[in-house]
Image (tube, grey):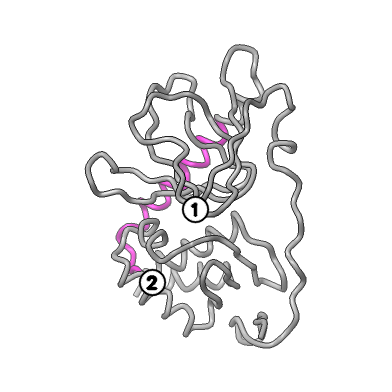
């Protein structure tokens, strides 16, 4: 049975047939002219694009799929700090960067990236990378500001943020979020133990703010943010 949003109760409820996901244009074709693109790379699930501390080779534009960006691998306590999907840029986020600051690993099959050379004359590429760095810094700053909030509030905000970045609106206020997102990855994003994160996910399900599992979710971003705000004040 397919779930749908009940606007009278602000819950994910049942039942109503939802429209299928819409095909999206290739991210690289929308963002950069062909002459500013380098080689394409296709990664399998679990395959690493680059590792934290390695010498920088390139910036990479994500064309399809999803990458987990993790830090701390050299210290034995790796933590996922961000996800990158179609249209995002990872790797070298500055022309002066010498080493990669994180490890990028494909979360799903057929994750495709395109190298973005940052040499002389590639003004469009440098502008794309500069904007990507600014967005990345903004997200990391928001995550740091949320560190003191209850885990359920952090999980709610994480779902809302992911839905706003990667989701497709399918009904009034309801968003379909199709990501290979495990509770381990979610726990890394919110900086909590897996068990605590799983309990928070169940709490959001009981509240009717999310539905689904195993990478296929229906979520209510506005209601999730309201829940997170209220939980942080209590």
Give percent across and percent down for residue 75: 22, 42
Q: Which residue is drawn at 39% across and 40% down?
A: 103
**Magenta-highlighted residues:** 130-151
Q: Nearer the viewer, mark 2 or mark 1?
A: 1
Q: Mark 1 points at which residue?
A: 107
**Residue 149 figure quarter:** bottom left
Give percent across and percent down for residue 61: 59, 36
Q: Residue at x 55, y 76 (%)?
A: 212
- Which secondary structure dominates the residues rendered in magenta? helix
Q: Residue 200 carries which label?
A: none
Q: In which quarter of the image is the C terminus?
A: bottom left
How many numbered markers are drawn? 2
Q: Does the magenta stretch include residue 89?
A: no
Q: Name the residue under label 2.
A: 152
Q: Is mark 2 on a helix, strand or loop?
A: helix
Residue 85 in the figure: left or right of residue 80: right
Q: Which residue is drawn at 30% across and 63% down?
A: 192
- Please tell me how crowded label 1 is: few (under 14), some (14-19), or many (20+) other residues with Cα within 10 Å: many
Q: Residues under labels 2 and 1: Cα distance?
A: 24 Å
Give percent across and percent down for residue 65: 59, 50
Residue 208 in the figure: left or right of residue 97: right
- Compared to residue 216, the image places residue 139 above or below, namely above
- Compared to residue 209, the image places residue 180 above or below, namely above
Q: Is residue 142 magenta?
A: yes
């Amino acid at each position: 049975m397919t779930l749908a949003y009940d606007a009278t109760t602000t819950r994910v409820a049942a039942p109503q047939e939802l429209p299928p996901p819409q095909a999206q244009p290739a991210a690289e074709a929308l963002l950069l002219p062909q002459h500013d693109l380098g080689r394409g790379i296709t990664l399998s699930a679990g395959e690493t694009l680059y590792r934290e501390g390695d010498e920088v080779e390139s910036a990479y534009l994500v064309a399809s799929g999803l990458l987990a960006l993790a830090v701390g691998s050299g210290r034995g306590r790796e933590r996922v700090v961000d996800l990158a999907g179609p249209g995002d840029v990872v790797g070298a986020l500055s022309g002066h960067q010498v080493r990669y600051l994180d490890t990028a690993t494909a979360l799903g099959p057929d994750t495709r990236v395109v190298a973005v050379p940052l040499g002389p004359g590639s003004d469009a590429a440098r502008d794309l990378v500069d904007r990507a760095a600014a967005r990345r810094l903004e997200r990391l700053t928001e995550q740091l500001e949320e560190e003191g909030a209850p885990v359920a509030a952090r999980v709610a905000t994480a779902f809302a943020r992911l839905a706003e970045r990667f989701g497709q609106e399918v009904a009034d206020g309801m968003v379909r979020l199709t990501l290979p997102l495990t509770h381990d990855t979610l726990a890394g994003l919110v900086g909590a133990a897996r068990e605590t994160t799983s309990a928070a996910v169940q709490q959001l399900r009981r509240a009717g703010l999310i539905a689904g599992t195993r990478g296929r979710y229906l979520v209510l971003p506005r209601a999730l943010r309201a829940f997170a705000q209220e939980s942080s004040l209590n």
